[in-house]
Image (cartoon, grey):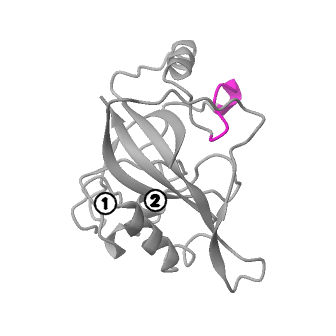
Amino acid sequence: MIPAGYMYKSVSAWPHGVHANNVIEVFSAGNCGCGISPRFADYIPHWKHNGYWFFNSPRPMQEIAGQEDIELSSMTLFYYEIYEYEFDQSADGKQADWIPFNSERSFQTDVLILEEKALAGYDVVEYACRNSPECSLLSCCNLADKFCVNSHCLFYTLEDAKKAVESGEFHAIEPGPYRILAVYVCA
């Protein structure tokens, strides 16, 4: 797993009426239009993110929040690590495989390694544009009821996440590619 960075997010409760094992709240790593656990701000125009489209430390987010008059105290700070391979269909769409990918080299990526962190689980995130994290398919596309997930709407293990991606369930909803992120809650 590669250190990918930090993000403040507003944690959402699992929507009523949506079926999913034991999900209570959503710690999704992605960000999409469904509005579940959104990022702290529209940060991209500030150009302070790293090559994984997260932040090397919490400080740049705190600066952006100050400039945009955003209160971070009610948000949760997450730290992410990313699996070094993404899963994508071949050009003919008949085969899929794990292939290596790189961070965007035009952004400095020098993540401050978090010493004290609590692993919440693993998320599968679509990267159709191949830069910033998009849909977290378990929560945004309501696939949590098809897999064994924890109370944060995340897979328990990296192997569980890999098996789920390889099952084809995600490709039936979104085209991919998919990346797996370890989701940590900062102390």
Numbered mark located on residue 140 in the image:
2
In the image, is residue 71 above or below residue 78?
above
Residue segment shown in magenta = 44-52
Q: Nearer the viewer, residue 22 or 16?
A: 22
Numbered mark located on residue 73 in the image:
none
Query: From this viewpoint, which residue is outermost toward the bottom?
Result: 94
Residue 51 lies, in percent from the top left, at 67, 38
Residue 49, picture quadrant? top right
Q: Is residue 27 left or right of residue 94?
A: left
What amino acid is labelled 1 in the image? Tyr
SS for dot 1: loop
Q: Which residue is mark 1?
A: 156
Task: Let me know if residue 34 appears in the view.
Answer: yes
In the image, is residue 79 above or below residue 173?
above
Residue 162 lies, in percent from the top left, at 46, 68
The residue carrying pointer 2 sits among few (fewer than 14), some (14 to 19) or many (20 or more) residues within 10 Å by Cα, namely many
Task: Let me know if residue 142 appears in the view.
Answer: no
Q: Residue at x 48, y 63 (%)?
A: 137
Indicate yes or no whether the magenta region holds residue 45.
yes
